[in-house]
Amino acid sequence: YTIETSLASADKPQDVITTRFGLREFTVTNGRFCLNGHPLYIKAAFWECLYPNTLANPHDKAIVRKEMVLAKEMGINLLRPWRKPLQPWIADLADEMGMLLVGGIPVECMNHWPEVSPQLRKRVAIEVRESIQRDRNHASIVWWELFNEVVRPELGRLKHNKALLARSLDPTRLIADESGGWWGGAHLYLPHSSEPTPFNELHRYLRNPVNAQIYDALRTMGNPKDKWRGTADQASVGFLSEVGFGGLSDLPKDVELYEAEGYPLTPYTRSQYALVDSLDSVMRELELYEVFESTSALCAASQAVQAEGNKLQVEAVRLNPH
């Protein structure tokens, strides 16, 4: 729908703004994600939103549209942007294309950030408030994710308080207090509720080979009868938001492209140069050039090996009814 809002003075319009908006309901019913009352099996992708020349804001909107098209073509129905505020036009594009999004608050944890200080509570509250107020009218955003892989208790103590703040700003969405759920488990707040519900929200980075123990653990994760590391007993629903492992991209080709088109001072670019140099050094030391004709060949082989492991992990998760 489109709504036109005007500010008038003495019956004369002073300012007019036109806004697109949509209506939908996304919740959990009987242990299942439901969209507009219909059960929906979430097939999601972790979305870094990193771009070579500008890091967070792509220089060409067509790049993001292509990413969403590719995601939809491979059956993805939700994207999880990682820990940075999306450009507003990206959420607009998701609204337009029917792609669900996780609204990630730009507060990182992972035992690194943010710094624990007397200002911590206030700063986190600012991020939660401004993120939700800015993006809460996007129909594509179906839940808010507040923290990520909390380790330090100073952050863990903020989870419930900030979930209540988020609820006061948006009564209609799911709220996950933590992605990863390392510290005390993750909790989900259902729409219109301020009560935390145990939530199996896990990250599992597993290299190939994937043995029977790993396969069975992924296949049964979230079963209330099983007690697997990181799961919450009697959790209402399971969500594996990070799974699998990456092979090496074609690092020499990456460097070649960055030299031609990239911005050389970004951390990602510097990392590529360091990776190529270190990989070449290791291959010489271990005489791997007798096995692989180039570093590019080794990178391709690593992709093939890990693709097999990822295929098995995704298969196990898809077979898991929880």
Image: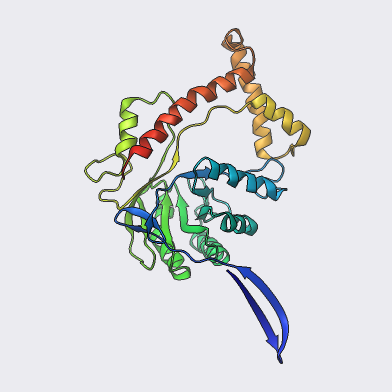
Left or right placement of residue 59 versus residue 283 in this view:
right
User: What residue is drawn where x is 63% and y is 26%?
Assistant: 250
**Residue depicted at 69% across the width and 50% down the height:** 61
> Which quadrant of the figure has residue 313?
top left
| Residue 214 to residue 94: above or below | above
Between residues 92 and 186, which one lies in front from this camera angle?
92
Horizontal relation, residue 53 to residue 106: left or right:
right
Looking at the picture, does residue 211 appear above or below residue 8?
above
Q: Is residue 157 visible?
A: no
- Which residue is found at the position 68% from the left and 24% from the top? 252
Residue 287 percent location from the top left of the image? 58, 9
Hey, which quadrant is residue 106 in on the image? bottom right
| Residue 183 percent location from the top left of the image | 37, 48
The residue under the point 66% across, 22% down is: 277
Q: Is residue 53 visible?
A: yes
Residue 109, percent from left and from top: 48, 48
Query: In this view, which residue lies farthest toward the left?
Result: 225
Q: Position of residue 52 (x, y in %)?
A: 69, 40
Of all residues, the one furthest to the right in this rendering is 260
Position of the C terminus, as image quadrant, is top left
What colouring method underlies this structural image? Answer: rainbow
Vertical placement of residue 123 versus 226, above or below: below
